[in-house]
Image (cartoon, grey):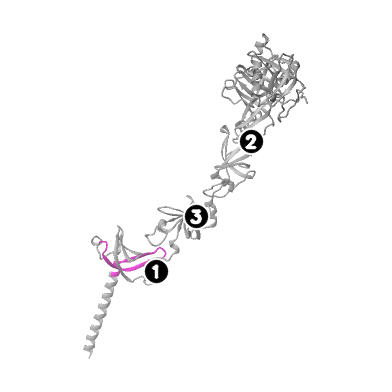
Amino acid sequence: MTKTIEEYELSTQDQESYEEFTSFYEQSEKNEKSSNATILTKGKIVKVNNDNVMVDIGQKAESKMPISEIKDSNGDLIFKEGDEIDLLISNSKGKSKISYKQALRQMKTKELIERIKDDYQDKVIEVEIISKNKGGFVVIWKSENVECFLPIKESALKANSKFNNKTIKVCIIKLSDSGIIVSRKRYFDISNKDKKEKIENMKNAESLQGRVVSVKDFGIFVSVDDVEGLVHSSEISYKNFVNPEKLYKVGDNVLVKFLNYDEEKSKLSLSIKALSKDPWEDIQNQLQVGYTIKAIVSSLQPYGVFIDAGNDIEGFLHITEISWEKNIKKPDSYLQVGQEIDVEIIELDPSNKRLRVSLKKLSDKPFTQFVKKYKEGDILDGEIATITDFGAFVRFGNIDGLLHNEDLSWDKQDRCKNVLKVGDKITVKILKIDRENEKISLSRKVLLESPASIFAKSHKVGDAVSGNIVEIKDFGIFVQLDKNIDALIKNEDLSPLKKDELQIGDKVEASIINIDSNNSKIRLSVRKLARKKEQDEIKNYNSDEKMTLGDILKDRLK
């Protein structure tokens, strides 16, 4: 039923036991020079009750210890009355205490001390903190499962730190009857000295073998000969953008090169890309602006696309250079990661490692495509894309044409912003294609029957009409014949009327001299109407004179 030292499991919940254990270390130096040293002995259990165990240790009176001393982790008794057990007797403040658990710990510690006593000084070990009091910390040597003591002055730990279950590295600085004394401060001293020597060796090395110990979005931490350094994401590749989390995992072996060591911050900087030649050095001899190259889409961003041009050269395709189509929202609607595309170089700056490319430049401009398909006079359907104070832009695929207010309808009062709305479908005619400025002029009103056409159905050239003056210009006057019909009388056609005597609103009678149905223009002439009236009077007069003379001659002949 008796447990061996190896079988016994330390209980991290027995705080009182740990405090006693810590006190052994605190007094270790004093105990070496005093009679208060702890003693390992054996005793016989004489009585077991609910709370305590009475043990005969060969003294006048039996000694007492808590029942928890002989219970396992499940709360079951591991000894019975009459069993002989190992005990540790400690003297503190004139009082003696016995402990079975401390005896096991002490025995295991002594076995370990005996094994390492010839080669322990500054031995680096990994420990876990399991308890703390005013004197220091009880720690477990993880590989040996043996308790050691870390004095506060040797801990280099902040008072407000969380200690329990914290794993640290320490150095063994002393072996005593009470146990193993360790120091974190000593470990730092040795580690820093060793680190400096290793870093000096790194400076002259062409390359260093390392192991990835941590991967972050900003880079990877690499351990080289137990010295940890950072390879920033910008030092992984000559590309402008890399994601370390997609390239590496913990445990990967990598070759790195020493860059810098900041002694003040104790930070080591490493590089992976420094082991290869900078591809940007020769790129200007191979590529030029205007060249077309093949590339692979490597990353999609809201503002554009990163492309892999090969040989660790990365370029950028801005969202506006993807397509001639306007208002592109998402690059992933056009391209996918891994897709091979042809692009044209639009900027090449090796000194700043800048390569900008265009996809849309390899296809015809929307204007070029449009003029290949349409010509002036063609009628086509479009959609209202934008409305302004001066008109509206009509979209045909990837290009817009302008419908000016004056070309909307024959009603001069109509305005695009009052008649149309964005998204409306509309049929228009191409009035003009300006190839030099890449502009398209449109008209809707030419597809509608003009007021002049309607007027011409009931009037013809030569007819006399009348209307009120609505506008007086330097070159003539405009007379309103109907709601949407104004006719022009030029200055030379006003006679016998005197222009300086005319006022807006005056009624004028004139003769129609021209009807332009296509442009809805009508020309009038007062002069021609007056001449016609004069001719008609002369004709009528002459006709009357002939009749009178005939009658006279007739009478004379009789």
Q: Residues within 10 Å of mark 2 (few under 14, many from 20)?
A: some
Q: Nearer the viewer, residue 397 or 508?
A: 397
Check disc 1 and report the residue beneath it: 454
Q: Residue furthest bottom?
A: 558
**Residue 217 appears in the rendering:** yes
Placement of 55 over or under 213, stated as above or below: above
**Residue 497 at what x, y percent from top left?**
25, 65
Placement of 395 over or under 79, stated as above or below: below
Check disc 2 and report the residue beneath it: 245
- Which of pointers 2 and 3 lies earlier in the amino acid sequence? 2
Give the residues in magenta: 503-529
Q: Residues within 10 Å of mark 1 (few under 14, many from 20)?
A: few
Q: Residues within 10 Å of mark 3 (few under 14, many from 20)?
A: some
> Which quadrant is the C terminus positioned in?
bottom left
Kindly report the distance in space between the C-alpha atoms of the residues bearing marks 3 and 1.
31 Å
Pair 2/1: label in front: 2
The amino acid at mark 2 is: Glu
Kindly report the distance in space between the C-alpha atoms of the residues bearing marks 2 and 3.
45 Å
